[in-house]
Image (spheres, rainbow, N blue to C red):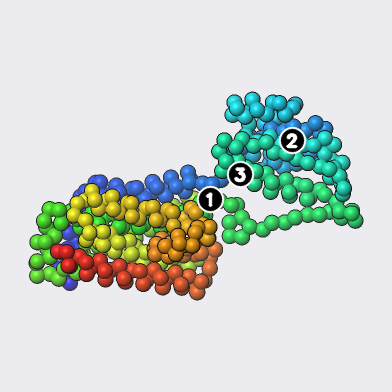
């Protein structure tokens, strides 16, 4: 064991004397979690709204005030006719125009004809769809709150958002970014470190030494495991104190799942190092084989349920899918450990399988 810890100490020295390694391992995750947490958002803010109201009434005024009070919209003024819409949108002075039907208030009574039309700049269809959805929800609440049924009673609506009442994008993206950063950093640095030893010829010299090859490999992985745990703690603190993402569940189970996930990432890096011979190839293999599956197939951005059946099946072998599910359940929903046992078992099985395969493959190649 003394020799093993000597190898671990050597790897720590190697990491901390290389400024580029420190930049990638410690500084980049901090920058990326802040960048993704603040910039990666599906929320659309600062939407400029203009109004065309031929016969202003109390009902239309109440709706306009409700739209303007929403944090996403700003009512910038009134237009006099629909002919003004096109030049206003072409000059980017307005994003949405609300057009009220004549005699709007009288149309709200049962049997009346009250209509509100949206004119939305759809040069970006996704943005236009989101803006229309926001306005539809606001107007439904405003109209339902003032609409009387045939008995004269007020009809009201109530919507309750569970776990994320403010609908903050950070609640969704931060767990995904955690899964992306941990697997990329761990796999990338482990694969490059070992391939560098193979490139310079020192790995063969180490493996023929009296120390068991498994000890040498694990000694190289321990420092990266330690630094990755530090990264996990840093990301968690930034998520809670800077991005306001809650930690509603058990910290113990979240940490345990993260440690297992880090082991999986390190094992993936070890496996990549067994099939390539150059550092540049190791970097490309790590980035291309891990980044795209994590982003596309883990549920980080795109719902897995919306994918074709074949892609849903393939996503089962992406470790990030199960880790992101655990972090969302624990951080946002605050569930008990019984609800994450399936994901924990799958991650543990992946970790054991990858360690066995990587070590066996490495021994055969060297």
Question: Which mark lies nearer to you, 2 or 1?
Answer: 2
Q: Could you give the CA–CA distance between mark 1 and mark 3, rounded to whole angstroms?
A: 17 Å
Tell me the residue that label 3 is attached to: 129
Q: Which quadrant holds the N terminus?
A: bottom left
Tell me the residue that label 1 is attached to: 169
Tell me the residue that label 2 is attached to: 99
Give residue 145's position: percent from left, percent from top: 78, 50
Residue at disc 1, secondary structure: loop
The quarter of the displayed image where residue 208 is located: bottom left
> Which residue shows up at 26% across the image and 62% down it?
271
For marks 2 and 3 on the same chain, the one whose residue lies earlier in the sequence: 2
Regarding residue 233, the answer to whether it shows in the image is no
Q: Nearer the viewer, residue 133 or 45?
A: 133
How packed is label 1: few (under 14 Cα within 10 Å), some, or many (20 or more)? some
Please state if 62 lies on the left or on the right of 325 as rendered. Answer: right
The quarter of the displayed image where residue 162 is located: bottom right
For marks 2 and 1 on the same chain, the one whose residue lies earlier in the sequence: 2
> Which residue shows up at 43% across the image and 62% down it?
315
Give residue 181's position: percent from left, percent from top: 37, 54
> Which residue shows up at 85% across the image and 51% down it?
148
Q: Could you give the CA–CA distance between mark 2 and mark 1, rounded to whole angstroms?
A: 30 Å
Residue at disc 3, secondary structure: helix
Q: Nearer the viewer, residue 307 or 26?
A: 307
Q: Could you give the CA–CA distance between mark 2 and mark 3, rounded to whole angstroms?
A: 18 Å
């Amino acid at each position: 064991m003394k020799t093993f810890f000597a190898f671990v100490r050597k790897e720590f020295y190697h990491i901390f004397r290389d400024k580029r390694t420190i930049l990638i391992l410690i500084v980049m995750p901090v920058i990326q979690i802040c960048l993704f947490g603040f910039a990666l958002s599906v929320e659309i803010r600062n939407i400029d709204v203009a109004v065309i109201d031929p016969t202003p009434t109390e009902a239309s005024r109440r709706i306009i005030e409700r739209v303007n009070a929403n944090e996403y919209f700003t009512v910038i003024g009134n237009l006099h006719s629909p002919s003004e819409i096109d030049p206003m949108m072409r000059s980017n002075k307005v994003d949405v125009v609300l057009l009220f039907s004549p005699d709007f208030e009288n149309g709200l009574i049962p049997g009346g004809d009250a209509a509100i039309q949206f004119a939305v700049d759809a040069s970006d269809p996704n943005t236009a769809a989101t803006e229309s959805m926001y306005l539809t929800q606001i107007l439904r609440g405003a109209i339902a709150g003032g609409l009387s049924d045939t008995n004269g009673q007020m009809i009201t609506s109530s919507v309750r958002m569970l776990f994320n009442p403010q609908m903050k994008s950070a609640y969704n993206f931060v767990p995904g970014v955690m899964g992306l950063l941990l697997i990329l950093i761990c796999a990338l640095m482990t694969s490059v470190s070992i391939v560098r030893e193979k490139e310079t010829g020192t790995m063969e010299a180490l493996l023929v030494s009296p120390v068991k090859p498994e000890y040498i490999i694990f000694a190289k992985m321990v420092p990266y495991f330690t630094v990755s745990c530090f990264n996990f703690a840093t990301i968690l603190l930034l998520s809670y104190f800077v991005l306001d993402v809650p930690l509603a569940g058990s910290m113990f189970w979240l940490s345990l799942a993260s440690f297992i996930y880090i082991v999986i990432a390190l094992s993936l890096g070890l496996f990549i190092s067994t099939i390539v011979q150059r550092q540049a190839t190791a970097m490309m293999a790590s980035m291309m084989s891990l980044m795209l599956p994590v982003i596309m197939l883990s549920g980080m951005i795109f719902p897995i349920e919306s994918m074709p059946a074949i892609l849903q099946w393939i996503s089962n072998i992406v470790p990030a899918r199960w880790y992101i599910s655990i972090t969302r359940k624990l951080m946002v929903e605050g569930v008990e450990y019984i609800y994450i046992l399936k994901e924990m078992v799958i991650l543990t099985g992946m970790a054991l399988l990858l360690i066995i395969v990587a070590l066996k493959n490495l021994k055969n190649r060297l």
